[in-house]
Image: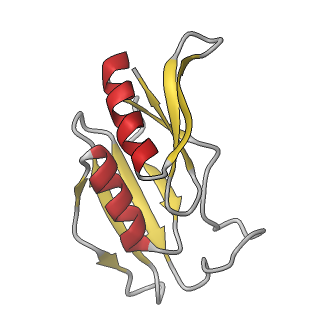
Amino acid sequence: MRIAHVALWTADLEASVAFWVDTFGAEAGEEYASRNRPGFRSRFLRLAEGASLELMTGPWIEGAVEAAERPGWAHVAVSLGSPEAVDTLAARCRASGQLVSGPRRTGDGYYEAVLRSPEGALVEITG
């Protein structure tokens, strides 16, 4: 078994797509607009080694805080393959204001840094 994809609700589909494309080099698929659920749109993104992310939006997401369909997750971790790659991306994200916490070795043995997406979702980058 494997996870097919992870989905994220977002109020700004294009800003979220740009974050994943610009920061992680994701390949963005075409936009899908549902005929059965008016206003629902989504795009799939594929990372270099095959992991997929679905970004979804709809008019009910804007301003949602308590609803089940609201922006965000606890975090998602993206493995970059080496501590050097973490250092490089963390430096780039520090310059753009996306870095939440710099590279460090965690208590559970990961070498990681934490980034923030345009809507505030946390993304850990690991080595």
Task: Name the residue nearer the viewer: 95 or 69.
Answer: 95
Q: Residue at x 33, y 48 (%)?
A: 23
Q: Residue at x 32, y 39 (%)?
A: 51
- Relative to 8, is 108 above or below? above
Horizontal side of residue 9 vs 65, given as left or right:
left
Q: Position of residue 67 (x, y in %)?
A: 73, 70
Image quadrant assignment for residue 70 = bottom right
Give the image's coloring scheme: secondary structure
- Relative to 112, is 50 above or below? below
Task: Name the residue nearer the viewer: 116 or 53.
Answer: 116
Q: Residue at x 57, y 53 (%)?
A: 121
Q: Position of residue 110 (x, y in %)?
A: 52, 16
Q: Which image quarter is the N terminus in?
A: top left
Q: Which image quarter is the C terminus in?
A: top left
- Relative to 48, is 10 above or below? below
- Relative to 18, is 112 above or below? above
Residue 63 visible in the displayed image: yes
Residue 82 visible in the displayed image: no
Horizontal side of residue 125 vs 24, given as left or right:
right
Q: Residue at x 37, y 17 (%)?
A: 83
> Residue farthest to the right?
66
Task: Name the residue nearer the viewer: 60 or 107.
Answer: 107
Q: Position of residue 34 (x, y in %)?
A: 38, 81
